[in-house]
Image: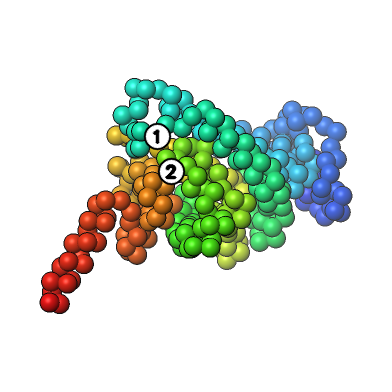
Amino acid sequence: MSVLTHGTGSFFGGNSSFADVMLPHTTNTYMHEYNQIAQTASHLNTPERMWAAWYAYIGNDVLATGIMSFMMHEIVYFGRCIPWLIVDRIKALRKYKIQTHKVPTAQEQWGCAKLVLLSHFTVELPQIWFFHPMAQYFGMAHTVPFPPLYKIIYQIAIFFVFEDAWHYWSHRALHWGPLYKNIHKIHHQYSAPFGLAAEYASPIEVMFLGIGTVSAPILWCAITQDLHVLTMYIWIVLRLFQAIDAHSGFDFPWSLHKFVPMWAGADWHDTHHEKFIGNYSSSFRWWDLMMDTQSGPEAAKKRRERKLAKAAKSA
């Protein structure tokens, strides 16, 4: 199973009882494990040695992956939100704010952060904790060496397309009366979104929309038996960046949608929050364009023009 043979834990092969899997059982320090791996696996690069040493240090796969996954999620989420909190306070950048008259207060941001943290620890933490057993069941690798860069890139591109399709139809369904009232309305508390509000949602919505993010790699792995946890991590990081930036409320001259055709971006999603309808996609614009669910005055004007043209043609 592994390119390494020393150390403890199922990361290095062998079967373990449930207690072995769920509890750490190593007495060595992290640096001891790292030095041992550096001596016996010189073909590995530094990140790969650090990765293998982490699993050896913790002593079991579930605990190692669970801690690393949750810490990564929290550091990336709040680490990406902090710059947007600062941007909101810089008056010189206010001209780039999409809804210039709506600036979130510190009280609103703190209230949002508290609910997001509660959701992270009560809803997302259990899912993250049991991610490794599920991923391992479908054949996801967590050993070293890491997969080549080209493989990581094309797999993540596939995940973006899959997740965007899931998000469009799921998000659109959440705007159906009863589902909106009982589930999705919480997320629309802020008509002018800000970065922290990306995961400000009911637990049901967090799980429902999160299926698209997690099921894409799991399905890919189940079919191809070719996916590494590292690729999953990079995918999650990029997905978090996309979600937070889409809720930032700012549209800069260097925003990604101005360079990447069909990329949605903050201006696309901000309009959704302002109008409460349309622009259901997460990463790309094509589903909204194909299904004629664009939001905003320009889209409304084009629909009126089409209706008038059709009426004139049938008259």
**Quarter of the picture holding the C terminus:** bottom left
Tell me if residue 229 comes above or below residue 170 in the rendering.
above
Q: Which residue, given by chain and number where applicable, does mark 1 sit on? A: 102
Amino acid, disc 1? Lys
Whole-angstrom CA distance, mark 2 to mark 1, is 9 Å
Residue under the point 45% across and 40% down: 193
Residue bearing the label numbered 2: 191
172 over 38 or under it: above or below: below
Please say if the residues under marks 2 and 1 sit with CB atoms less than 8 Å apart. yes
Mark 2, Cα crowd under 10 Å, few <14 / some 14-19 / many 20+, is some
How many C-alpha atoms fall within 10 Å of the one at disc 1: few (<14), some, or many (≥20)? Answer: few
The type of residue carrying mark 2 is: Ser
Compared to residue 286, the image places residue 11 above or below, namely: above
Q: Is residue 216 visible?
A: no
Measured from the top left, where is residue 150 in percent x and y?
46, 49
| Residue at (66, 34) in percent of width and height | 50
Q: Is residue 278 left or right of residue 169?
A: left
Question: What x and y, as percent, mark residue 269?
Answer: 40, 47
Q: Position of residue 71 (x, y in %)?
A: 65, 37
Q: Secondary structure at mark 1?
A: loop
**Nearer to us in this view, 160 or 251:** 251
Nearest to N terminus: mark 2 or mark 1: 1
Judge by depth and name the residue closer to the eye, 251 or 240.
251
Q: Secondary structure at mark 2?
A: loop
Residue at the limit of the structure toward the bottom, as seen here: 314
Kindly identify the residue that appears in the image at 35 percent across and 60 percent down: 293
Question: Residue 14 location, x and y as percent?
Answer: 81, 53
The figure's colour scheme reads rainbow
Task: Say which mark, if any, is on residue 39.
Answer: none
Can residue 230 be seen here? yes
Counting the numbered discs, the total is: 2
